[in-house]
Image (spheres, rainbow, N blue to C red):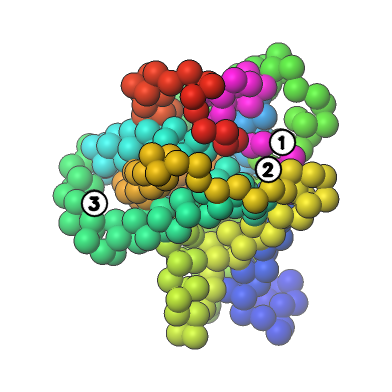
Amino acid sequence: MFESFGFENATPQQAAVLLAVLVGLVFGVFGQITKFCFRRSLVGEDRVAAAGVWLTALAFAVVGTQAAVAAGWITFDAHRFMSADLPYVAIAVGGLLFGAGMILTRGCISRLTILAGSGNLRAVLVLVVFAVVAHATLKGVFAPFRVALGSITADLGAAISLANWPGGSWFWTGLIAVAALSYAAKSGNRAGTLVMAAVIGLLVPLAWVGTGFILFDEFDPIAMESLSFTAPSSDALFWVIANSSIPAGFGVGLLGGVLAGAALASLTFGGFSWQSFETPAQTGRYLAGAALMGIGGVLAGGCTLGAGLSGVPTLSVAAIFAIVMIAVGALAMQAALKVSPAQRPAHG
């Protein structure tokens, strides 16, 4: 398929990086304007409106992704989300850790990437620590812990996908989309905000189709990917320090595009502001949260975008379980902190 689109002067991997940059730019711009954030949809003072934005994006991501599957452009049969052996302990622990971490840092990793592009130095430090810890969990000192938890599985067989449940893929796609859009319609958001949220959601199937169909080349295969920040953060860290020997991939392009898009939007529409830590205690809190998200994102199989916005549209039970556990971890940490809004650090 790759050759038929006339990419004579680029490899599939190079074209994937360009696609990722463009996807990241759009996500960065609209994410900055809409303040797109899963944490805000759970515990923010404006959580109803924030949830409306997030659920609108999810609805369009689910419908778009399943439409691409129905058209025969992509399939998730061999994707890691569809492994019959569900590592339920790793996902549960990882989700809880990630959710707790994003409360401590006052933003999931996708939101913090956008904030980093708008001048927030707290978010920049969190991104670096998150990437280091995620890489250590994937391939470093925390890898034995990951392997040990991942070895505890439950065999779900074909039931790992909602597409194989009673009703089939379109029943569950419609149920998710209708429920999400019904909530969004009552969330009090302006129509323009929901339109931008819909565009964010459509970036998910665009990336799946782009990497899994348009850029597919059986002689030079690349991974089918969509919006995600855990593995890409690890890849970006490695690429930054060793780019002469490691080529950039989709994840590197995506992070670069998001940072650039957020910077462009904040400089154009207002919102760019240099911010840093106010107290040592705040610094410690953010570092702890970054570490928890780094470990948790790997164990859970993704962040609020990788397992949530991109994972749920695959209709994977593993992805749905992961985003539910992230939400549980966030709510539990929020309850444990018992800090009034006035005492929390000013950070969106």
Quadrant of the frame with the N terminus:
bottom right
Question: Is residue 344 at least partly visible in the picture?
Answer: yes
**Residue 149, image x, y percentages:** 20, 45
Mark 2: secondary structure: helix
**Residue 214, image x, y percentages:** 66, 64
Quadrant of the frame with the C terminus:
top right
Q: Amino acid at mark 2?
A: Gly
- Magenta stretch encompasses residue 48: yes
Q: In which image quadrant can residue 131 be found?
A: bottom left
> Which residue position holds label 1?
34
> Residue at position x 41%, y 53% from top?
130
In this rendering, position of residue 271 left or right of residue 191: left
> Residue at position x 78%, y 52% from top?
267
> Which residue position holds label 2?
31
Q: In which image quadrant can residue 317 be found?
A: top left
Mark 1: secondary structure: helix
